[in-house]
């Protein structure tokens, strides 16, 4: 049945109304009138009783004009075929079941006619457009993270929380739970795990802190490097997407 060739995509196996009409005509007996696509389209709402709106589609004809058609999944393709004969319904069902088995085995169906090839090319172009738009959306974020990672200097955890748009308390908690920072027994200040420091994500710096009486004292402060900030942005985004 090489003349019945539904489209196999990553998500489902479908068959257009054009393909169904072509197949029905290939099965007609001697003297039987050829089915017109326009007549088939008029029959679809009667058979699917309003559900056809979920399967509306368009194709480009030989004059480069958009024309209406339908793209049916297995159930609806079989219903339409059955409206002509049970024999046609069985053949459509068998063919689409066969292709489901092929797809499950990791093989890819190769278009066998020019319309199929053009339709597959159009589908791939649509998928490529979606991917391109996703890349364009993500590019500014990637560039921003790259600039952060390559920047000089480090910042305290409170300032990092502001850049990451997260409450400082939550960032301290996340860093502690994920073994970025810790406190010594009886200590009050946060220290960075040595592995994070060696990875260039954190660093310790001696900074000057002003006391309430106006005097100053020197303290060692755990700070997040630009590379660490970039890594945190990546990890926190993954957490939100999960």
Image (cartoon, grey):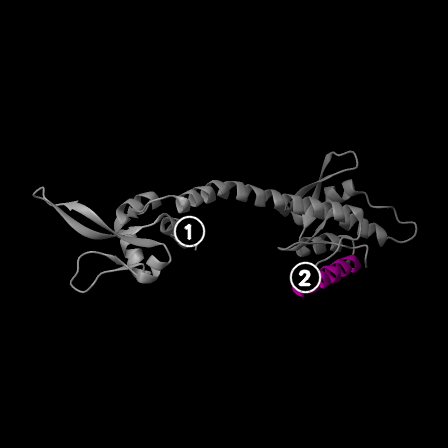
Question: Where the N terminus falls, by quadrant?
Answer: bottom right
Q: 10 Å neighbourhood of mark 2: few (<14), some, or many (≥20)?
A: some
Q: Position of residue 131 (x, y in %)?
A: 57, 45
Q: Position of residue 140 (x, y in %)?
A: 47, 40
Question: Where the C terminus falls, by quadrant?
Answer: bottom left
Which residue is rendered at x = 45% and y = 43% of the image?
141
Which residue is rendered at x = 87% and y = 46% of the image?
33
Decide whether the magenta segment is chiefly helix, strand or loop.
helix
- Please indicate, yes or no, whether residue 46 appears anywhere in the rendered image: no
Residue toward you, 38 or 66: 66
Mark 2, residue position: 103
Q: Position of residue 170 (x, y in %)?
A: 28, 52
Mark 1, residue position: 234
Q: 10 Å neighbourhood of mark 1: few (<14), some, or many (≥20)?
A: few
Q: Position of residue 37 (x, y in %)?
A: 78, 43
Outermost residue, left side: 213
Q: Secondary structure at mark 1?
A: helix
Q: Which of the two labelled residues, at mark 1 and mark 2, occupies the earlier sequence position?
A: 2
Q: Does the magenta segment cover residue 91? A: yes
* Location of residue 143 with respect to 77 vertically, above or below: above
- Please indicate, yes or no, whether residue 9 appears anywhere in the rendered image: yes
Which residue is rendered at x = 42% and y = 45% of the image?
145
* Location of residue 241 with respect to 179 vertically, above or below: above
Q: Are marks 1 and 2 in contact (CB under 8 Å)?
A: no
Which residue is rendered at x = 77% and y = 40% of the image?
38
- Quarter of the view holding residue 101: bottom right
Residue toward you, 233 or 4: 233
Q: Which residues are magenta?
A: 87-106
* Location of residue 214 with respect to 183 vertically, above or below: above
Residue toward you, 137 or 78: 137
């Amino acid at each position: 049945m090489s003349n019945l060739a539904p489209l196999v995509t990553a998500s489902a196996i479908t068959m257009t109304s054009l393909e169904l009409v072509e197949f029905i005509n290939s099965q007609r007996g001697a003297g039987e009138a050829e089915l017109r696509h326009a007549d088939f389209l008029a029959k679809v709402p009667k058979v699917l009783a309003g559900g056809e709106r979920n399967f509306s589609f368009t194709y480009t004809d030989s004059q480069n004009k958009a024309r209406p058609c339908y793209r049916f999944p297995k159930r609806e393709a079989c219903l339409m075929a059955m409206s002509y004969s049970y024999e046609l319904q069985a053949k459509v069902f068998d063919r689409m079941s066969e292709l489901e088995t092929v797809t499950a085995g990791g093989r890819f169906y190769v278009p066998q006619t020019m319309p199929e090839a053009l339709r597959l090319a159009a589908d791939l172009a649509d998928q490529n457009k979606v991917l391109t738009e996703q890349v364009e959306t993500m590019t500014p974020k990637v560039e921003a993270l790259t600039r952060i990672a390559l920047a000089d200097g480090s910042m305290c955890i409170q300032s990092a929380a502001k850049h990451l748009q997260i409450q400082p308390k939550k960032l301290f908690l996340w860093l502690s739970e994920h073994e970025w920072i810790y406190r010594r027994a009886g200590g009050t200040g946060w220290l960075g795990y040595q592995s994070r420091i060696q990875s260039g994500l954190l660093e310790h710096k001696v900074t000057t802190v002003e006391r309430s009486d106006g005097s100053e004292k020197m303290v060692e402060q755990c700070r997040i490097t630009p590379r660490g900030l970039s890594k945190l942005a990546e990890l926190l985004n993954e957490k939100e997407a999960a």
